[in-house]
């Protein structure tokens, strides 16, 4: 039988007063921001989704024919119920992104197709768009729908301004070779590494990301962010489903290739990515919960290593 010693300590988290076991209070009293806190960024506001998400009906040499994405339409708010079929756009306006539900620990299950009216610098340019009449015509149509249905109080005048809110779309032009992504909300962290040289992915606002040219750093971070003790301790400092940058309220150190524990975490992170990819191939409907069960032994080893570098 386990006994916990409680202290009448007022610990305020988001306005809530907590009384916690001594060992949990010790964790909270040792909170220290990670240097990664400023480096991880929230993705772009790729919304309203019904206006820009699509599925490909047919590919041609320079064009694609697109329809509304039925999965997106099934969850769309009535005000943004916009449907299209057999629309033609130039290939260069076809980008890929992903939704929170497609992210599981150590793996991204699926990418979504999205139309973005931007140039090579991920910026909107009337002069550039005019060179591509099919994309320009489609953008004019969806932008008109946006302007007719947006709230009167909003100061975001165009669809592009909404997509690039706070410059979160355009700044992704600086992304490096590897992306580490994790969910902005939920009960558990889910993180995965994306090879940005193979898949040029635009990250949406449901997720946070950091880019690096160091493959080992990417897998090191994915191991830590998927560690069960990090998710457990984050729940101590949040009163809702929102995660945002709370992982970095704990002192996750910058990757050091000369640190043997860091190298072990990177190696285990990469091994888990391979394992979960194989699990997904055998069962495309696999859930995050099932993944954690099947790789539990690996997660327990990661947990022990994370305890040594983060929760000392």
Image (spheres, rainbow, N blue to C red):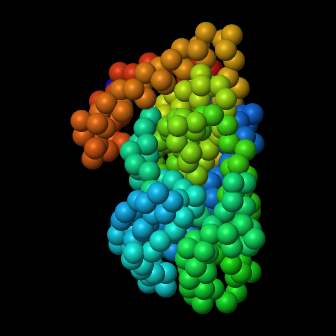
Q: Which residue occupies 69% across, 59% down?
A: 119
Q: Position of residue 108 (x, y in %)?
A: 43, 42
Q: Is residue 275 left or right of residue 150?
A: left
Residue 64 in view: yes
Q: Which residue occupies 69% across, 73% down?
A: 130
Q: Quadrant of the N terminus?
A: top left
Q: Position of residue 190 (x, y in %)?
A: 47, 41
Which residue reaches farthest front?
61
The image quadrant that residue 179 belongs to is top right
Q: Is residue 240 left or right of residue 83?
A: right
| Depth order, front residue of 211/145 | 145
Q: Position of residue 222 (x, y in %)?
A: 53, 32
- In this rendering, is residue 202 above or below 5? below
- In this rendering, is residue 249 above or below 100? above
- In this rendering, is residue 58 above or below 235? below
Q: Which residue occupies 51% across, 28% down?
A: 223
Q: Position of residue 20 (x, y in %)?
A: 55, 41
Q: Is residue 271 left or right of residue 310?
A: left
Residue 72 in view: no
| Depth order, front residue of 246/2 | 246
The image quadrant that residue 28 belongs to is top right
């Amino acid at each position: 039988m386990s006994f916990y010693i409680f202290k009448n300590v007022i610990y305020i988290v988001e306005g809530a007063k907590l009384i916690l076991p001594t060992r949990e209070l010790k964790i909270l009293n040792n909170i220290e921001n990670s240097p990664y806190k400023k480096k991880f960024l929230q993705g772009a506001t790729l919304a309203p989704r019904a206006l820009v998400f699509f599925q490909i009906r047919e590919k041609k040499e320079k064009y694609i024919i697109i329809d509304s994405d039925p999965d997106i339409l099934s969850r769309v708010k009535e005000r943004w119920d916009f449907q299209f079929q057999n629309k033609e756009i130039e290939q260069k306006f076809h980008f890929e992104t992903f939704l929170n539900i497609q992210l599981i620990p150590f793996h991204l299950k699926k990418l979504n197709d999205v139309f973005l009216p931007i140039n090579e610098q991920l910026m909107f340019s009337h002069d550039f768009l005019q060179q591509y009449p099919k994309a320009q015509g489609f953008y004019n149509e969806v932008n008109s729908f946006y302007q007719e249905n947006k709230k009167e109080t909003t100061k975001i005048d165009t669809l592009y301004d909404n997509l690039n809110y706070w410059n979160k779309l355009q700044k992704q032009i600086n992304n490096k070779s590897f992306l580490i992504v994790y969910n902005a909300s939920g009960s558990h962290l889910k993180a995965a590494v994306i090879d940005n040289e193979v898949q040029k992915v635009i990250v949406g606002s449901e997720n946070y990301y950091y880019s690096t040219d160091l493959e080992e750093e990417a897998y090191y971070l994915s191991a830590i962010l998927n560690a069960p003790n990090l998710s457990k301790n984050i729940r101590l400092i949040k009163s809702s489903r929102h995660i945002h940058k709370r992982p970095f309220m704990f002192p996750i150190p910058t990757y050091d290739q000369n640190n043997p524990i860091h190298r072990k975490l990177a190696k285990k992170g990469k091994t888990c990515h391979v394992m979960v990819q194989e699990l997904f191939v055998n069962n495309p409907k696999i859930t995050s919960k099932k993944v954690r069960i099947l790789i539990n032994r690996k997660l327990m080893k990661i947990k022990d290593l994370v305890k040594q570098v983060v929760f000392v």
